[in-house]
Amino acid sequence: MPPEQVRPMAAAPANPVVARARFVPYVARRAAKLWTTDVVHVHYATSARLLRERGMPKRPYALTLHGTDIRKQWADPHFHDEIQRAIDGAAHVFYANNDTADNAVAARPDAEFLPALVDAASLPAWQPDARPNILFVSRWDEDKGMERQLSLARQLRRAAGPDVRILGLNWGPGAGRAAEAGVTLLDRMSQEEYHRVMSAAHVAVGQATNNFATSEFEALCMGLPLAAVGTRLPRPDDGSTPPVLEGTEDDVVAQVLEALNDPRACASTLGGSAWALPRYDAAAYVDRLEDLYRGIASR
């Protein structure tokens, strides 16, 4: 179920009665789903609370820890008990990020790595716009290496020249500063619309951390050249790292400018889609997950 079907996405109305009433269709929808479900796969630990609401039939669940829930909230006294309760109550626990392995295994010794998966079949073909553009794919947030991202954006704006558009989402506490750095901000949009924007980019810029998230893997699966400050942690299963334009800010700026001259040649050299598709395309994990769900249901 996409998030907009699970709970209201808009800000709550001022009237408390109306604010509570707007949850009714969402609760009814979730309950109806649960009545016809054997196993639930919960994404993000705080969402497990939705299974315990009044009127919800009890169902076993697998849990994927997606990042901030196990990276920050699990260590936060305000959230720790809720996160740990969700972890303890799960029939199986996955963690989706290389940098959260230690916390995930500390919270649940049998936690297993399952990366953030991409529905590669739904992605549009990569077709760069006539006008060169660079797309920052992450929100402007410290979890994404915001200060380094802002510094990189400023350097790219100075170096790329006026004919190159530098784009990013109007999302996150640093969005205003990104606009000041010369980034053209795009209003938040549907996933399908965002994929179309991504497919028109000449170069994508990933988060400036040692880890990537879904947007970066979507760009890699699509075949775009992807750049990112720093280096990435190896995957826990095969020890590989994403093939991207990386290094210091100066290194990344120089490589991005070169990639803009011939993005398809750069993409071919990097081989991002050949690396990413067998590791992040959801289709490759269907059999494994079906076996897991059958096992949970049988218990």
Image (tube, grey):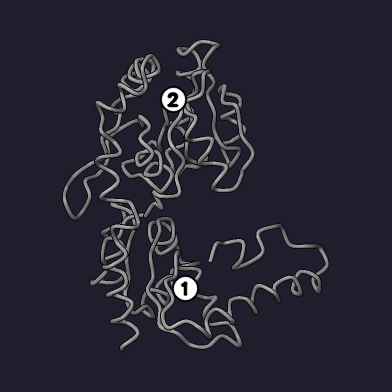
Please state the horizontal and vertical placement of residue 282, each as a whole percent of the image.
35, 57
Residue 162 drawn above or below residue 176: above
Q: Is residue 22 left or right of residue 174?
A: right
Q: Which mark is residue 221?
A: none
Q: Is residue 273 left or right of residue 171?
A: left
Element marked by disc 2: loop
**Rendered-image quadrant of the C terminus:** bottom left
Q: What amino acid type is highlighted by mark number 2?
A: His
Query: Which residue is labeled 1 in the image?
Result: 82
Q: Earlier in the sequence, mark 1 or mark 2?
A: 1
Please state the horizontal and vertical placement of residue 51, each as a whole percent of the image.
52, 79
Q: What amino acid type is highlighted by mark number 1?
A: Glu
Query: Which residue is labeled 2 in the image?
Result: 202
Residue 208 drawn above or below residue 240: above
User: Measuring 59% from the left and 68% from the top, which residue is drawn there?
Assistant: 6
Front in this rendered view, residue 231 or 120 = 120
